[in-house]
Image (cartoon, rainbow, N blue to C red):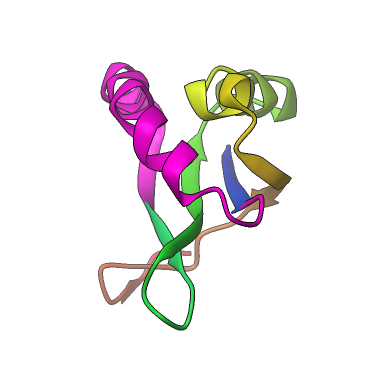
Amino acid sequence: MHFVVTRHDKPNSLQLRLATRPRHLVYLEAVTDKIVYGGALLAADGTQMGSILVIDVPDMAAAREFADADPFVDAGLFAETLIEPFRPVFRDGKRID
């Protein structure tokens, strides 16, 4: 089952994000089998202010476990995390449902 993990950083936390990013990327590299798509949310000036990941895991409990294991969580980076079920309709420019 697919889930969207949307996260918004706390204000003025770019330095925390940059300092923790290497551990975050190591974590994501270890779970690439669960990641469908992911990337940065950008502020109007182009700085990163959060992220979106589409993940494929069995259920909401697994999605929460995936999200909670991110080193950014222990660092206290996020002001908000939303985890929502997602049903893909298009992929790579083609309808898939």
- The one nearer the camera, 52 or 18, is 18
Identify the residue at the far bottom of this view: 44
4 relative to 66, above or below: below
Task: Give yes or no for residue 44 being in the magenta stretch.
Answer: no
Q: Position of residue 16 (x, y in %)?
A: 48, 37
Q: Position of residue 6 (x, y in %)?
A: 61, 52
Locate residue 76: give its quadrant: top right
Q: Is residue 83 left or right of residue 24?
A: right
- The one nearer the camera, 25 or 14, is 14
Q: Position of residue 26 (x, y in %)?
A: 28, 20
Region of the chain picked out in magenta, as a range: 9-38
69 relative to 1, above or below: above
- Identified at 47% across, 83% down, the residue is 44
Q: Position of residue 81 (x, y in %)?
A: 70, 44
Q: Is residue 81 visible?
A: no
Locate residue 57: give its quadrant: top right
